[in-house]
Image (cartoon, rainbow, N blue to C red):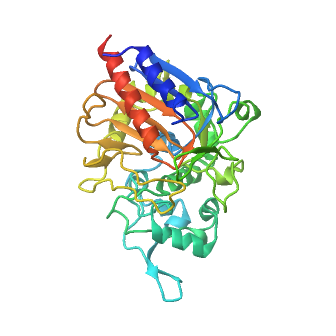
C-alpha cells in the first residue's frame, strides 16, 4: 500500500535526479481525482514551476478524442465502421501500396486490392504508416519532399500504404485520415467539432489545436535527450520536423492523429467520461454501448507490433508491454493480460510523442495520465517513472 506522499517522492526524485525537467501526473477512481501532482520546471533551467494547469503538446493522445468524435457520427448513423470512406474523401478512394523502389530510387506503387474502411483507420490496419517507424515510408517522404500536413490536402499527394488494407497492424497516419472523414461528413473543422461536442461539454477549457494567448503562457517547453543521456531544451514545444512549420494554427493542418494541446486535468476529465460509460457531470458524450465497443479488440487475430524506430531522434523502439500479445480497439492499445501491481487485462491506453501517457482500467475503474515534454518517444526513464506512478496509484486505491 502507498499514500500520496510516496507518489510525490517518486516524482520528486525523478526531477531531482535530472531524469525529467518537470512532470505533472493525475489519477482518478472513476468518481474523483485521487491524485494530483506537479513537480520541477516547465523548461530545464527555468524559473517557472510546473503546475497542474501547465499545458502540454499531447500529440497522439489526440487520437482518442478524435475517435470519440467519430463515434458520435457512428451513433448518429452518418457513417458505419465498415463503410468505404473513399465515398467521403477522394484521396482514400483509390489507395496505392508502396512496394519498394526502383534502381533509381523512384517509388514503386500499385493499386490496393482492399478498401479503406473507418474501422481500419481507427485500428491502424488501413495500411498507412508513420515514417518515424517505417524506413520505406521515410525514404518515400524524403523522395517527395512534401511535408506531412500537406499530404492530406490533395488526393495526388496522399501518402501510399505500407501494406494491403486489413492485413497488418502498423502505427500510422490512419486516424489523421479519420479526422478528415469527420470533416467531410460534418462540413466543420476538426477543432470546431471537438470543441462543440466534446471539449466544452466536458469542461476541457484548456484543450484545443490553437495556441491561444492564455494557452501559450502556460505551455511547457520541449526537451531532447541526447545520446549521452543529457536533456537539452528544444526551441519549440512541438516535435522538431525540418519540413513542417509548427505549431500548426491553420485549420487545414489540424490532424486527428495529433496536434492538440491540453492539461493533465482536462485529459483526466476525458478519462472520467469513458470510465463512466460516456457521461460526466450530466453531459452525455457517448452511449455506454459505444464506449464498451471502443474498448474491444477490433483487429482479430492480428497483433500490435513493436514500433521499430527509423528516426532515433524522435523515437526509441516502442513496446509498452514486452512479451505480451497486444490488441487494438477503436483508437486504444489493449493489454491482454493483468499487469501485476498495475492495470487489469483489457485496460486501454496510449501516449503522445513527447512522452505523455494515459491509461484507463474499466475493470478496476482506475485511470490516470502522466505528462512530460521529452524526445525521443518511449524514453526509458520516463517509462520507468510512468510505471512507478501507476503502481503508486494502485497502491493508493488498495489503501482506501
Note whether 365 is above or below 198 in the view shown. above
Q: Where is residue 133 shown, x and y percent of the image?
A: 45, 60
Q: Nearer the viewer, residue 250 or 54?
A: 54
Q: Where is residue 197 shown, x and y percent of the image?
A: 56, 34
The residue depicted at 30 percent of the width and 53 percent of the height is 299
Compared across the picture, whether 14 is left or right of 183 comes to left
Q: Which residue is situated farthest in the bottom direction here?
A: 103
Note whether 61 is above or below 114 in the view shown. above
Q: Nearer the viewer, residue 235 or 91?
A: 235
* Residue 24 seen in the figure: yes
Q: Where is residue 337 shown, x and y percent of the image?
A: 23, 39
Q: How many marks?
A: 0
Quarter the C terminus occupies: top left
* Residue 95 seen in the figure: no
Q: Quadrant of residue 303?
A: bottom left
Q: Quadrant of residue 98?
A: bottom left
Q: Where is residue 264 shown, x and y percent of the image?
A: 54, 29
Compared across the picture, whether 350 is left or right of 242 comes to left
Quarter the N terminus occupies: top left
Q: Which residue is situated farthest in the top direction here?
A: 400
The residue depicted at 39 percent of the width and 45 percent of the height is 330
The residue depicted at 74 percent of the width and 30 percent of the height is 214
Compared across the picture, whether 61 is left or right of 322 comes to right
The residue depicted at 54 percent of the width and 25 percent of the height is 265
Q: Nearer the viewer, residue 100 or 272?
A: 100
Note whether 370 is above or below 150 in the view shown. above
Amino acid at each position: 500500500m502507498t499514500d500520496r506522499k510516496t507518489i510525490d517522492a517518486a516524482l520528486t526524485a525523478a526531477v531531482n535526479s535530472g531524469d525529467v525537467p518537470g512532470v505533472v501526473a493525475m489519477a482518478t477512481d472513476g468518481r474523483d481525482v485521487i491524485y494530483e501532482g506537479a513537480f520541477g520546471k516547465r523548461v530545464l533551467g527555468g524559473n517557472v514551476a510546473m503546475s497542474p494547469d501547465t499545458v502540454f503538446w499531447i500529440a497522439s493522445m489526440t487520437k482518442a478524442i478524435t475517435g470519440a468524435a467519430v463515434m458520435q457520427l457512428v451513433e448518429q448513423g452518418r457513417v458505419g465502421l465498415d463503410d468505404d470512406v473513399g465515398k467521403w474523401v477522394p484521396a482514400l478512394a483509390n489507395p496505392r501500396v508502396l512496394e519498394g523502389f526502383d534502381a533509381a530510387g523512384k517509388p514503386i506503387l500499385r493499386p490496393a486490392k482492399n478498401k479503406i474502411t473507418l474501422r481500419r483507420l481507427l485500428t491502424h490496419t488501413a495500411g498507412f504508416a508513420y515514417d518515424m517507424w517505417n524506413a520505406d515510408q521515410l525514404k518515400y517522404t524524403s523522395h517527395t519532399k512534401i511535408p506531412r500536413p500537406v499530404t492530406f490536402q490533395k488526393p495526388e499527394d496522399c501518402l501510399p500504404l505500407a501494406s494491403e488494407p486489413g492485413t497488418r497492424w502498423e502505427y500510422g497516419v490512419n486516424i489523421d485520415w479519420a479526422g478528415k472523414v469527420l470533416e467531410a461528413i460534418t462540413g466543420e473543422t476538426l477543432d470546431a467539432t471537438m470543441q462543440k461536442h466534446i471539449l466544452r461539454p466536458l469542461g476541457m477549457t484548456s484543450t484545443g489545436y490553437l495556441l491561444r494567448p492564455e494557452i501559450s503562457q502556460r505551455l511547457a517547453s520541449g526537451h531532447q535527450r541526447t545520446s549521452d543521456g543529457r536533456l537539452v531544451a528544444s526551441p519549440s514545444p512541438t516535435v522538431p520536423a525540418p519540413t513542417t512549420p509548427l505549431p500548426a494554427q491553420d485549420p487545414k493542418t489540424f490532424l486527428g492523429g495529433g496536434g492538440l494541446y491540453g492539461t493533465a486535468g482536462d485529459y483526466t476529465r476525458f478519462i472520467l467520461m469513458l470510465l463512466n460509460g460516456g457521461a460526466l457531470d450530466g453531459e452525455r458524450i457517448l452511449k455506454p454501448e459505444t464506449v464498451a465497443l471502443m474498448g474491444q479488440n477490433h483487429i482479430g487475430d492480428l497483433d500490435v507490433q513493436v514500433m521499430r524506430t527509423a528516426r532515433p531522434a524522435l523515437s526509441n523502439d516502442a513496446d509498452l508491454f514486452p512479451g505480451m500479445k497486444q490488441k487494438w480497439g477503436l483508437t486504444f492499445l489493449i493489454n491482454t493480460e493483468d499487469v501485476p501491481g498495475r492495470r487489469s487485462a483489457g485496460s486501454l491506453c496510449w501516449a503522445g510523442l513527447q512522452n505523455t501517457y494515459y491509461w484507463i482500467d474499466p475493470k478496476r475503474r482506475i485511470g490516470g495520465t502522466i505528462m512530460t515534454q521529452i524526445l525521443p518517444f518511449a524514453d526509458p526513464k520516463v517509462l520507468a517513472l510512468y510505471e512507478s506512478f501507476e503502481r503508486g496509484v494502485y497502491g493508493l486505491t488498495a489503501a482506501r
